Amino acid sequence: MDVPLNPFLNLRRTQRHAPVAAAMPARSDVVVVGAGLIGLSAAWRLAEGGRTVTVLERETVGAGASLAATGMLAPAAEHEPGSDPLLPLALDSLARWPGFRDALQAASGIGIDYREEGTLVLAIGRDEVERLRFRHDLQIRSGLRAQWLSGPEVRAREPGLRPGITAGLHCAADHQVDPSLVMAALVRACLNAGVTIVEGCPVEALDWSGDRVTGVRTNLGAVTADLVLLASGAWSGEAGLLPEALSLPVRPLRGQSLALRTTARTGTLGHMVWTEQVHMAPKGDGHLIVGATVEDCGFVPGVTAGGIYALLEGARRVLPGIEEMAVEAVWSGFRPTSDDDAPIIDVLAPGLIVATGHHRNGYLLAPATADAVADLAANGALPDYARAFGLARFRRAPALRASA
Ligand SMILES: Cc1cc2nc3c(=O)[nH]c(=O)nc-3n(C[C@H](O)[C@H](O)[C@H](O)COP(=O)(O)OP(=O)(O)OC[C@H]3O[C@@H](n4cnc5c(N)ncnc54)[C@H](O)[C@@H]3O)c2cc1C
């Protein structure tokens, strides 16, 4: 069992990728800004399509949101009022995951701990049961599969859960991966496909020729490119790289999480578990991930006593056995969140594409996003399944309000 040990606590989820050391090329067909999940997934696809690709990362691979994630691929458990517009893309991407997984594992030689037990969404007490019924109705109306379970039926599936669980939903089609393994596999697959990844390399400016982007400037020098892909996560909305007229409606939402170490004595969960307070996801390496806070506090890094307390209290409320588990790591990351919580995949200017705003669904949406970026790069148009996720939806909004 591969459980990294730390003398005290990690402030970041373990990085398992091989160290990356590469020199900056002066030219590349494509430059990707940001070595997160979205940048690397797209870089891999584009390189497999025959382009030379360079990924420039300000810090280290996955240092933004991507190594902070839980790795749930859970459109059913996460479905709530208001998320209907995202659902077709989420289901499309979930359906692409087995092919993405197989190709990624084959290209990298790294297993990504893809698990298919589904999510158990739990309720304790009458009020939560009412809200669970509402959630179940919504799921059924939206065509999602979820099975209603009594409290004893829930506990028959997860004996470690508290006897007071009143009811639950089993969302069997929800899956999960281990983000640290996915990122390690993406690094390896990219390198095997000839992608250059440069860490410690902030992109400081875009180079323009008229209205066309022709490359980037960094602390290590300039790179000319036919195409720049902006995949800089929560930082995509920051002033600096883009001219005012192209600014993106993206902001950071901080999420704190922690990893508990399970043993044969403590037991663990067999499913992902979702409550109104926390989600928990058991990983193949023996960790139980407990996440995640949602905080609109800008780019304030780190974890807080209040955040970790809320996670532990929420977890203990349904799984008393956590009291015996060692706290292995605590960390936080910044979800890249757009104004409608859905991704933004579009051409911003000739030679410039953006893929960002994946909020809490980057893992779920990565396969569909990578394919959509490859289509955009090849044809300048989004495929049908992603057409609703361009920037036009934000530009339309003021006009609609004005005419109302
Ligand atoms: C606590 C938490 C739990 C989550 N759980 C889940 C989950 O269970 N399932 C799921 O699907 N999603 C989950 N997410 C969301 C998911 O992690 C994100 O949607 C996804 O990782 C976004 O990937 P990204 O590549 O767009 O951004 P990031 O991973 O943030 O990558 C962007 C990269 O760009 C770099 N960068 C920024 N500016 C520059 C620059 N100027 N030059 C060079 N590099 C730059 C950054 O350093 C960063 O590494 C979770 C997120 C958090 C925080």
Image (tube, rainbow, N blue to C red):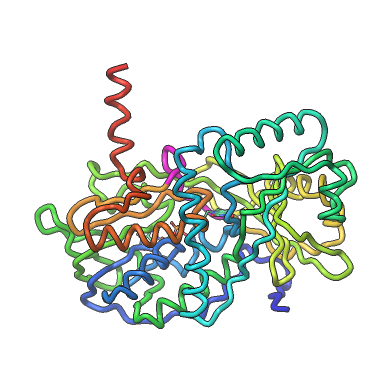
Q: Quadrant of the C terminus?
A: top left
Residue 350, percent from left and from top: 17, 55
Q: Nearer the viewer, residue 49 or 276?
A: 49
Snapshot quadrant of residue 265: bottom right
Residue found at x 71% / y 75%: 3
**How far across and down, in percent of the image, does residue 80 sit?**
58, 37
Residue in the foreground of this view, choosing between 24 and 220: 24
**Residue 72 horizontal side relative to residue 62, left or right:** right
Residue under the image location 66 percent in, 37 percent down: 136
Query: Predominant secondary structure in magenta?
Result: strand
Q: Residue at x 47, y 74 (%)?
A: 103
Residue 51: say if magenta: no
Q: Which residues are magenta?
A: 333-342
Q: Is residue 135 above or below residue 71?
A: above
**Membership of 340 in magenta stretch:** yes
Q: Quadrant of the N terminus?
A: bottom right
